[in-house]
Image (cartoon, rainbow, N blue to C red):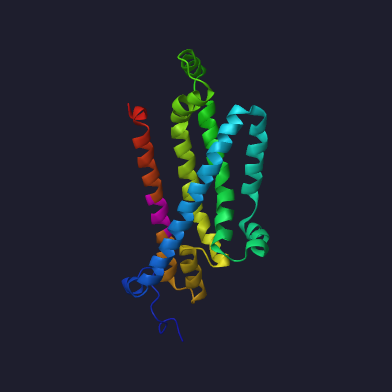
């Protein structure tokens, strides 16, 4: 078949979208669930680790160092390590994504806690705040903008990394993109998966930015 006789292969096709709405919706649900679960778990682990690093200074270096080492592990190698233990499952991809997100969450939360002015802490202690009250009422609220920034960076990074999960069958829009490449470079399918990732990353980022502004009204003054 000559190039002139080849069937059209456009980068965008409404026909493809309408005929594959169910598979695209399934990819979207998988991508959203992996991203949301990753950020929730990374925040639940990373923020307490940042607090421990802030309060017990000698632990800060090891915690950040370990998070950095985990982040540098190539995704293929990480899945190769987790696969024999957990199998090719949703949890395999989720654990890998959480390990990658930890560095950004811990580092930004710790930076925010360290940037709380010393005179603010002294004033809070003078008003009778104990260690726990100082943390909950003063330090964490003032560190919240930095914490939200870390969550936003981790979220956008996770949306991109979810696509690598297609190696074990749980890649969200990555499955769509890979199938497009395996289907004689079907451009419309590749573009649909790519645009899905981009739009999803943008929506997550805007949502977290809005939540951050609502949670820190003093920062808008």
Residue at x-position 47% and y-position 48%? 155
Residue 60: which quarter of the image?
A: top right
- Residue 199 is one of the magenta-drawn residues: yes
Please give left or right for residue 31 compared with residue 76 in the image.
left
Residue 65: which quarter of the image?
A: top right
- Where residue 42 appears, as percent x and y from the top left, is 53, 46
Closest to the observer, 208 or 4: 208
Closest to the observer, 40 or 155: 40
Q: Quadrant of the C terminus?
A: top left
Magenta segment, prevailing SS (helix, strand or loop): helix
- Where residue 205 appears, as percent x and y from the top left, is 40, 46
Residue at x-position 66% and y-position 62%? 85
Please give left or right for residue 202 compared with residue 158 in the image.
left
Count of marks placed on residues: 0
* Magenta segment boundaries in residue numbering: 197-203
- Residue 173 is one of the magenta-drawn residues: no
Residue 3: which quarter of the image?
A: bottom left
- Where residue 152 appears, as percent x and y from the top left, is 45, 44
Closest to the observer, 181 or 103: 103
- Where residue 45 appears, as percent x and y from the top left, is 55, 43
Residue at x-position 37% and y-position 73%? 20
Q: Is residue 81 above or below residue 49?
A: below
Q: Is residue 187 above or below residue 156?
A: below
Residue at x-position 49% and y-position 76%? 183
């Amino acid at each position: 078949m000559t190039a002139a006789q080849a069937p059209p292969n456009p980068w965008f096709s409404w026909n493809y979208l309408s005929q594959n709405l169910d598979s695209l919706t399934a990819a979207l649900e998988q991508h959203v669930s992996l991203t949301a679960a990753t950020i929730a778990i990374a925040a639940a682990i990373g923020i307490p680790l940042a607090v421990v690093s802030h309060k017990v200074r000698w632990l800060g270096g090891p915690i950040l160092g370990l998070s950095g080492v985990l982040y540098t592990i190539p995704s293929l190698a990480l899945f190769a390590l987790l696969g024999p233990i957990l199998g090719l499952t949703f949890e395999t991809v989720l654990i890998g994504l959480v390990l990658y997100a930890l560095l950004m969450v811990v580092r930004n939360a710790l930076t925010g806690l360290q940037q709380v002015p010393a005179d603010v802490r002294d004033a809070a202690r003078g008003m009778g705040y104990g260690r726990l009250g100082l943390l909950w009422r003063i330090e964490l609220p003032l560190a919240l903008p930095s914490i939200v920034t870390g969550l936003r960076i981790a979220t956008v990074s996770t949306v991109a990394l979810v696509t690598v999960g297609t190696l074990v069958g749980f890649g969200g829009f990555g499955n769509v993109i890979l199938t497009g490449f395996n289907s004689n470079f079907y451009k419309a399918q590749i573009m649909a998966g790519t645009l899905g990732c981009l739009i999803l990353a943008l929506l997550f980022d805007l949502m977290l930015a809005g939540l951050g502004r609502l949670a820190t009204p003093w920062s808008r003054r």
